[in-house]
Amino acid sequence: MGVAGLLMFSFTVATAEDLRVGTWKTAQTIQPFFYGKFLPRGFKTEIYPFTNPADQKTALLAGSLDMCGTTLAHAIHSASRGQPVSVVAALCNKCSALVVKKGGPVRRIADLKGKRIGYVPGTMHEILLRETLVRNGLSPDRDVVLMRVDFFDMGTALARGGIDAFLSGEPFPTLSVDQGYGEILAYPYYGESIGAINAGMLVRKDTIRKNPEQVTALVTAHVEATRYLRNHPEAWLKRAASFGTEFRVLQKAAPNMELAWHMDADFIKKARALGKRMEALGVIKGQPDYDQLFDLSFVNKAHP
């Protein structure tokens, strides 16, 4: 074997068990950054940060990732279009807030009529925003101007007057309050039928079929990382602060964030209810097969 062949062989061996995982650099989606502590022997991870679920899912389907974070709304939307993906663990719950300019004219949700609202399409935040508007007598398509704004740009856009409000995940709502330009108008959660479910971990169906041991390793690491961070909140928030938000701000945001891994029949029931609301709001045209979308076997195996 020549030198080039030997190098190629060595590279293949060295990276054969590498598992590529996508997530956001936020406190509520932090677990993948801790997978290395809990992976079974013979596996290691490379973590790739993204700013939205659509890009993560695109990379997953292209084979560039083995697992990625996704909002449950995005997972339902993907499955409704026949894309071959499965949610194998929960990621986080809660985390959302509707923010307006501090001291501005918006004092209640009805005051948002005619206003510009920042959002990220395909996220739970979009569904929560649309639902909140509809429940308060406002049409998302006619009565307000929905503007696509990246999560990391929403605060700046609100502070500079580019938008009048935004619905986003933490820490951006708490950060806007801390910096003095925003105030939280509402924590827009659903009722008992849907609860505060938010995001999960997504894999391709062919990965489950061809490499179930990889999915088992990743879900096991996810469960253990989540349990560790829940039991060590200071370690959780200190690591999250390395993403660029001050520790003290994260402490204020923590009550509105919940790390998660568990999925069961009740979780799927809530996802079905979410899907029905998405269809009623016109976000999807039909319902996916939820038993195919949510695979509980890996969380059950990781934590019987």
Image (cartoon, helix red, strand yellow):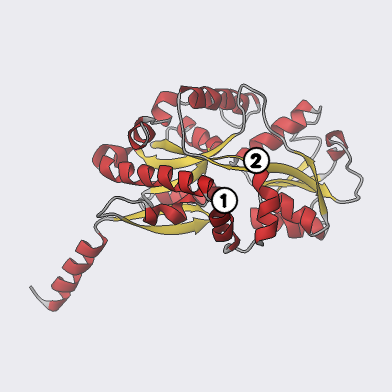
Kind of residue at badge 1: Pro
Q: Nearer the viewer, residue 135 or 34?
A: 34
In this picture, is 138 found above or below 114? Answer: above
Q: Nearer the viewer, residue 287 or 225?
A: 225
In this picture, is 268 found above or below 253? Answer: above
**Image location of residue 101, percent across then percent down:** 84, 51
Whether pointer 1 and pointer 2 mark residues with C-beta atoms closer than 8 Å, the reply is no
In this picture, is 144 found above or below 190? Answer: below
Where is the N terminus found, in terms of image quarters?
Answer: bottom left
Query: Does any portion of residue 289 appear in the rendered image?
Result: no
**Image location of residue 178, percent across then percent down:** 78, 56
Q: Of helix, strand and loop, which one carries label 2? A: helix
Q: What residue is shown with label 1?
A: 233
Q: Assess disc 2: are there few (<14), some (14-19) or many (≥20) residues with their C-alpha within 10 Å of its C-alpha.
A: many
Sequence-wise first label, 1 or 2: 2
- CA gap between label 1 and label 2 equals 25 Å
**Image location of residue 155, percent across then percent down:** 74, 56
